[in-house]
Image (tube, rainbow, N blue to C red):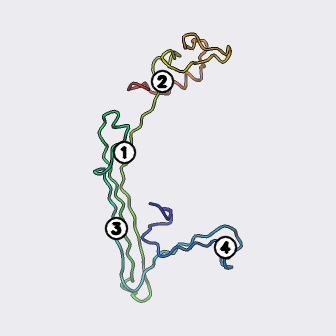
Amino acid sequence: MGGIPERLGSIEAVHEVKILTNTYSAEYGRTSGGFVLVQVKSGTQQYHGSLYEFHRNSALDAAQWENNARGIRQTPLRRNEFGGTLGGPFPWMRDRLFFFASHEGLRDNIPSTSTRTIPGPARRTGDFSASPVVVNDPLAGAPFPGNIIPPNRRDPAALKFLGLFPQPNAAGV
């Protein structure tokens, strides 16, 4: 949710927000910039509270274009934001002791589809002959013959790094 950052607590607990930008009184010290003052609700002599729930699901959402292109059905989305506040007097000290509490909860499952292009078997061996991009020899300044990097010119560190990639499981781009 926008507005007040999460670390300040529930939005339902906010009573007043005041933004000071200049000509501060002495209580704020000698500083530049601005102040954001957030006052939270407090208990009173009468009980009061609030409840809310925001529910979202994928029933009215459009499918992602990546999924449509591959014929993958839409993954379900469920998001529930809920909370409430309660304030009032403590029963045994009705005129002198008050309480206020708030709670905010979030239940969220976020579906995602991730597609990455990783080197296929030919590119792992230095064969870029199927690629439209010409691979140049940095020492000679000319393209490698057949767009294939010879085995003695492959960097050992790059080969070790290449070993960290998984094998492709779908046709690449």
What is the C-alpha distance between the residues marked 4 and 2? 57 Å
Q: Please tell me whether mark 1 sits on a helix, a strand or a loop.
A: loop
Residue 170 vertical position relative to residue 122 in the rendered view, above or below: below
Q: Amino acid at mark 2?
A: Pro
Mark 4 surroundings within 10 Å by alpha-carbon count, few (fewer than 14), some (14 through 19), many (20 or more): few
Q: Is residue 25 above or below residue 83?
A: below
Mark 4 vs mark 3: in front: 4
Residue that mark 4 sits on:
22
Which mark is drawn over residue 52?
3
Q: Sequence-wise, which precedes: disc 4 or disc 2? A: 4
Give the quarter of the image for residue 134. top right
Residue occupied by mark 1: 111
Query: Earlier along the polypeptide chain: callout 1 or callout 3?
Result: 3
Query: Gap in Å between the C-alphas at discs 1 and 3?
Result: 25 Å
Residue located beneath label 2 in the image: 119
Q: Position of residue 107 (x, y in %)?
A: 35, 55
Q: Secondary structure at mark 2?
A: loop
Label 4, label 1: how many angstroms apart (C-alpha)? 45 Å
Callout 4 amino acid: Asn
Q: Earlier in the sequence, mark 1 or mark 2?
A: 1
**Residue type of the residue flagged with mark 3:** Tyr
Q: Earlier in the sequence, mark 4 or mark 3?
A: 4
Label 4 sits on a secondary structure element that is loop
- Residue 20 x %, y %: 61, 73
Single out the residue that lies furthest toward the front.
132
Local crowd size for mark 1, using a 10 Å CA cut-off: few (<14), some (14–19), many (≥20)? few
Q: Distance between the Cα atoms at labels 3 and 2? A: 50 Å
Would you identify the image quadrant in which residue 141 lies? Answer: top right
